[in-house]
Amino acid sequence: MAKPIVSMINVEKWYGRNHVIKNCNLNIMEGEFLTLLGPSGCGKTTTLRMISGFELPTSGIIRVEGESVEKKEPYERDVNTVFQNYALFPNMNVFDNVAYGLKVKKVPKDEIAERVDKMLKLVQLDGFGKRRINQMSGGQKQRVAIARALINRPKVLLLDEPLGALDLKLRKQMQIELKRLQRKLGITFVYVTHDQEEALTMSDRIAVINEGVIDQIDVPQKIYNHPATRFVAGFIGESNILDAVVLGKNDTGIQVGTEAGNAIGVSDDETIETGDAVSIAVRPEDTLFSKERQPGFSIRGVVKDHVFVGNLVKMMVILNDGTEFKINRFNEDDMIEPGQVIYLYWEKEKGKVLKTRSLVNTDSHRDIKGGDEDEEEGYAAEA
Amino acid sequence: MNRRQKKQKAAHITATIYTVLLMIFIYVPVAVMIVYSFNNSRVNMVWSGFTTKYYAMLFQDSELWGIFGITLLVALLATALGVIIGTLGAVGLKDAKFPGSKFISESIYFPIVIPEIVLAVALLLLFDATGMKLGFGTIVIGNTTLILPYVYITVRARLVGMDPSIEEASLDLGADRFYTFIHITLPAIVPGVLSGAFMSFSLVLDELIVTSFLTSAEITTLPIRVYSMVKKGVSPEINALTTIIFAVCMAGVLVYLIRDQIQMRKIRKEREAEAKWPA
Amino acid sequence: MKKKDMQPKPKARRDKKTAKARLASIVMNGPITIWSILFIIVPVIILAVMSFMSKGPLGIVVYKPTLENYRNIFSSMYFNVIKESLIIAFWTTVLTILIGYPFAAIMAKMKAKTSSLFMILLMIPMWVSGLVIIYSFVILFNQSGILNTILMKIGLISKPLNMLYNHFSVTVGMLYMFMPFSVLPMYSSIEKLDPALIEASKDLGAGPVRTFFKVQLPLTAPGIFAAVLLTFIPCIGYYMVTDMLGGGTNMMIGNLIYRQFTISRNWPFGAALAMVLAIVILLMVWIYKKVGGNLDDLG
C-alpha cells in the first residue's frame, strides 16, 4: 500500500494567461481513496483531467505505475473516469454501454457477456442490460457509469463529482456504496468534489486545493483538526479566523496579538517566528467564554444574538474591532443574553496559528510520508 | 354554445379556410403542370387534347435521359463531397482553436447569406483566373460550395444538442478517435447529416444559377435544359418528367409517414409493456 | 526547494495537444478550411479586385484600377434596374410575411405531426422543380390561359386581363418560389413562444390585437427577420422568374449581372454589380445578427 500508483511531479497548467495548476506535486497511493477537494475553479477537475489525459500539462511529469503518461492519449492510459453527468452513450442500451470498453479491445463475445453480467451484479443492476439509457433513473445511470468505467479493470478510477446531480438521500446512499465498492475491489479511487462532508466521510486522504495549489494533503481527521493553512481552516468545517502577529513563542504555545486582543495558540509549522504575520483559527464549538479575562487572552466582545438550530445553539459575538465571532453550544442554558460583555478564550491546542500562505506544497516528500502513516490511523478509526 | 366556444369555432374555421386557400395557391400550379404533361401540343401554352405520348417519348428520349443522368451525378457527387467535408468540419471546428478557425467557420455561411449569383460570379472569375476549364468539374465544385453551409448548419445543430463528454468517455474507455467518431459521434449526429444530405441533394437537382455560370456548352443539366426552353415554351415532355419526379417524392413522403406511424405504435406498445414491469 | 515564480507569464500559451490529437484536427478541419479558402474566400477577393478593373475592346479585361464601374451603377439606366429589383424584392418579401406569418401561426397550433406534414406539403413543389412549376403560371396567366378563360366564362370580365409579363406575374412567381422556405423560421419562433405570456397579457386586460402587437410580434421578430432575409436575399439576385414571367420587360439586378457575363461581356461591371449586391445583403445580415438573429436559422 505504500507504493505510489500515480505521481504528479512539478506539474504546471496554463490556459492562455491563466495559471490554473501551480507546481503540483502529488503522489496517489495504491488502493487508497483520495479526494481532491476545493471550491469550483480551484483546479481540481483540471488535475483529474490531466491524469485521465483530456488535458495535457504545460510542463511536468505524470506517472502511472512508474510509467510516464503525460504525453499519452486518454485511450492509452490504464485509468478510467466516471463523469459528472454520467456521459452514457444514448444510442446504446445498458449492456452495450458497459460492454463498450471490452468491445473496443475486441474481447470475445461470450467473455464480454460474462464480464458485463458480473459487473452489473456488482453495481446491483442485475437484469437491466436491455434497458435504454433514457429509461434509467439518475441513481441507476450513475451505477451504469461506474460499471462501464470499472469493466476495463483500471488501475485507477477517476470520479469527477459523480454524485453532484443526485438528491441528498440518494447521494448519502451512493457514498456508502462507492466506499464499499472501493474496499471490495481494492482499486485506487481519485474523487473530485467541492462537498467537504462527502470528502470527510469517504476519503482515506484528502487533498485540499486552493487556486491551483494543494494547500494540504492528509487524512480527514488531520485535515479537520490540524488545518495547515488559513484557507483549509476556513473551507473545512466552520472556523473563526483572525489576522494576527506573533508576539512570542515557547514550548507550550504561541502568543499572538489581533486587532481585537491577544490570544494563545499552537502551530505545526516550526518556522513561525516572533513578528510573523499569521492567522489564528478556532472552531465555534471549541471557543470558551467567561465574565473575566483568562490568562493570555484579552479578546472581548458583546453578545449580539443566539439562534437555536436543532442540535445546537449558535451565538454571535461582536468583537472590539467589529469582527463577528461564532460560538456553538449544545445546550441553550450555556448561552448568555444579548448585550452582555464576555471574554473569549480556548484551550491553547484548539487555537491554530497558521501562516497566511502555506509552503507545504513544495515539500511533497514530507506530505507523502505523513500521509502514509496516517492512513493506518484512518482505516483503524473507520473500522 | 357560449361566446368563448363560438369564438374558438370561428377561429378554427378561419384557420381551415386559410390553410385550404394556401394549399390551393401552392398546388394549382402543380396540378396544371401535371395536367399539361398530358397535353397534345408541342408548345405547351394552350390545351389541345389528351395524350400520353410524351411519357412514351420521354422513355425513348436518350438525350433527355443523358441530361437527367448528368444532373443526378452532379447532385450525388456534390452532396457526397458536401456531406463529408461539412460533417467533418462541423465536428472539427466545434472546438478548434487554430489561428483563423473563427474566420473559417464564419466564411462557411457566406454562400447562404449572399445571393447565389454573387457566388456564381466569384467562382467563375476564380476558374477563369486559374485557367480551369469550365465543365463537369467546375459544376460539382460550385454546387458543393453552395450546399456546404446547409450540411454544416444541420450537423452543427445536432452537435449542440450532444453531450461532449460522451466522446471523452469513449476515448477514456480505450477507443481511439476514429473508433469514437464512427461509434459515438456519428450516431449522435446522423439525423443532422441525413437532413443536410437530403436538403443538399434536392437543392442541387434544382440548381440553375451556379450551374449555368460554371458549365460549358457540352454539359447540360435538367434545370438548364428547362430554362433554355422557357422562351420557346416548355415541352410537355419536361412536364412528364417532373410529374414522375413529383410522384416519386410524394411516394417517399408517404412511405416515411407510414413507417413513422408503425414506429410510433411500436414505441407505444413497448411503453405499455414496461409499465407492467416491476420498477 | 525553491519557490517557483508565481508571476503570470506575459505570453499567452497555446493549448498543448498530442501528435494524434493534432492529426485528428487536421483530418477534420483540413478539408473544410482548404475548401472555404479556395472556393469562398479567394473567389470573393478576386471578385472585389475585378470590380475595380475596366473593360477593353471585345470584352477583354484591362487590369487598370478604376472606380468607373461603381460610378456607372449609379447612372440612371442601371439605377432604374436596381430600383426595380428592390421594389419587386420588397413586395415579394412583404407579401411573403403577410401570407406566411398567419400560416406559421396556424401550424404552431397544430399537433407536431400535422404541422410537419404541412411543412412537407408546402416545400415539396419547390423541392421537385421550382422552374417547371413556375412555368405553370404562364399557362395560368396568359391571355388565352386558364384563369382568363374561367373568369370570362363566369362573366366576371369581358376581355382578357393582362396578367402576364408585368410586376404582378413576377411578384406572384417570386412569392411562390420563396414563401415556403420563409415559413419555417417564423413557425419555429412562434412555436417556441411561451403560451403563458399570451395568457398573461390577456389576463392583464389587453385585447387580442394589443396582445398580438405588444407581445407576440416583438417576441417572434427574429423569426420574421430571418424570413425577410430568406426571401429578400435570393429574390433580389434571382433572374429566372423575371425571365419567365417578366417577359424581358422587367429586369432585375440578377438579370443585369447575368448579361454582363453573357451578352455584354463586361466582367468588371458585372463584378461591381455583384459586389454592391453582396454589400447590401451583408449589411442586412449584419443588422440581423446585431438584433440577436442566428445565422443557423437561415439554413
Image (cartoon, rainbow, N blue to C red):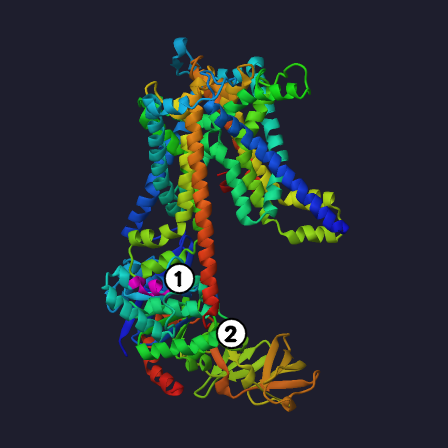
Rendered image: mark on residue A168: 2
B60 drawn magenta: no
Tell me which residue sits at (56%, 13%) in the image.
Answer: C77
Type of amino acid at the residue the image marks with label 2: Leu
* SS assignment at label 2: helix
Going by the image, does C293 lie left or right of A82?
right
Work out whether residue A239 or residue B60 is closer to the camera in this orientation and state it. Answer: B60
Going by the image, does A27 lie left or right of C122?
left
Tell me which residue sits at (43%, 64%) in the image.
Answer: A84
Q: Do labels 2 and 1 share a chain?
A: yes
* SS assignment at label 1: loop
Type of amino acid at the residue the image marks with label 1: Leu
Q: Give the range drawn in magenta.
A: A93-101
Inspect this view and state whether residue C203 appears: yes
Counting other residues with Cα less than 10 Å from the Cα at mark 2, is it few (<14), some (14-19), or many (20 or more)?
Answer: few
Work out whether residue B268 or residue A364 is closer to the camera in this orientation and state it. Answer: B268
In this picture, is B112 found above or below C208? above
Going by the image, does C297 lie left or right of A90?
right
Horizontal and vertical percent position of residue C166: 59, 18
